[in-house]
Amino acid sequence: MALSNNVIGAINFIAVLLSVPVVGAGVWLSTEPDNSCVKILQWPVIILGVLIFLVALAGVIGGFFRVQWLLVFYLVVMLILIVLLSCLVVFVYMVTVRGHGHPEPSRAYLEYNLDDFSGWMKRRVRSPYKWDRIRTCLSATTMCPELNQSYRMAQDFFNARISPLQSGCCKPPTKCGYTFINPTYWISPINTAADMDCLQWSNDQNQLCYNCDSCKAGLLANLRKEWRRAEVILIIALIGLICVYLIGCCAFRNAKTEDLFRRYKQGYT
């Protein structure tokens, strides 16, 4: 029994370690400017990671110190957390399965259309109240001024691999036909009827294209890219937790069998 409990404790310590990348993924998302402005995914990931850590720690204590009710608590609650983590992984995949960028002639960067994204993601930015808060947060970042420092010539900018957020918010849509002065200052549009965003563009450095649908689409594309990276970490942690949980269940069952066999021998003698 003691040996099986030690095995359970050691196995659960691996679960404690697996909680670290889950929390780390949430913390990383919270440090990204776009995620910090939207505040959707990072807190569920962080909270789930912390709960996994605490429950796994309870399993470690229950294993090494032979506290049976802690082991039962671990087995029940960890199963619930694994299900929740699985649901989160599936949810992230479903809402980010759409939203690829579109190439433009003579441009290295991509442009993004709001209608290409899932309905759930679009609802996060279509509410005027929500977008006003997000827009204010985005305009306070340095992502657009950084373009002016990095690209002086038009061709250098056209060949640049800028982020989806910069593509959507810091410049007008290419189809409008604006003339490049610098990355955040454009004049003389050729076709303002090509898209409503063509009329939304402003050379005011506090406005730019933050009111454009292309900015909302660029934000969602940025979120999609970062959420997909976080999802890889969550999937790896999930697979590890499932393996640890199954091994822990087997060890717990063996420990109970050993205990029953020991009691049977004591009663027989």
Image (cartoon, rainbow, N blue to C red):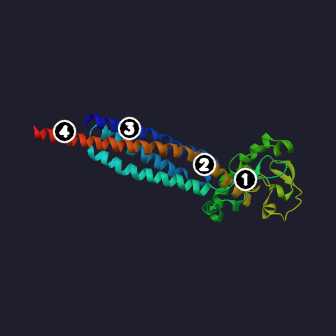
- Mark closest to the chain's N terminus, 2 or 4: 2
Residue at label 4? Answer: 262
Q: Nearer the viewer, mark 4 or mark 3?
A: 4
Crowd rating for badge 3 (residues with CA inside 10 Å; few <14, some 14–19, many 20+): many
Query: Hey, what amino acid is under mark 4?
Result: Arg
- Mark closest to the chain's N terminus, 3 or 2: 3
Q: Residue at x 82, y 55 (%)?
A: 174
Label 2, label 1: how many angstroms apart (C-alpha)? Answer: 15 Å
Crowd rating for badge 2 (residues with CA inside 10 Å; few <14, some 14–19, many 20+): some
Crowd rating for badge 4 (residues with CA inside 10 Å; few <14, some 14–19, many 20+): few
Left or right of 22 on screen, residue 198: right
Say which of 149 and 163 sits in front: 163
- Identify the disc placed on residue 11: 3
Residue at label 2? Answer: 228
Expressed as whole percent of the image width and height from the top left, the position of residue 13 reads: 39, 37
- Identify the disc placed on residue 101: 1
Crowd rating for badge 1 (residues with CA inside 10 Å; few <14, some 14–19, many 20+): some
Which image quarter holds the C terminus? top left
Say which of 128 and 84 sits in front: 84
Query: Hey, what amino acid is under mark 3?
Result: Ile
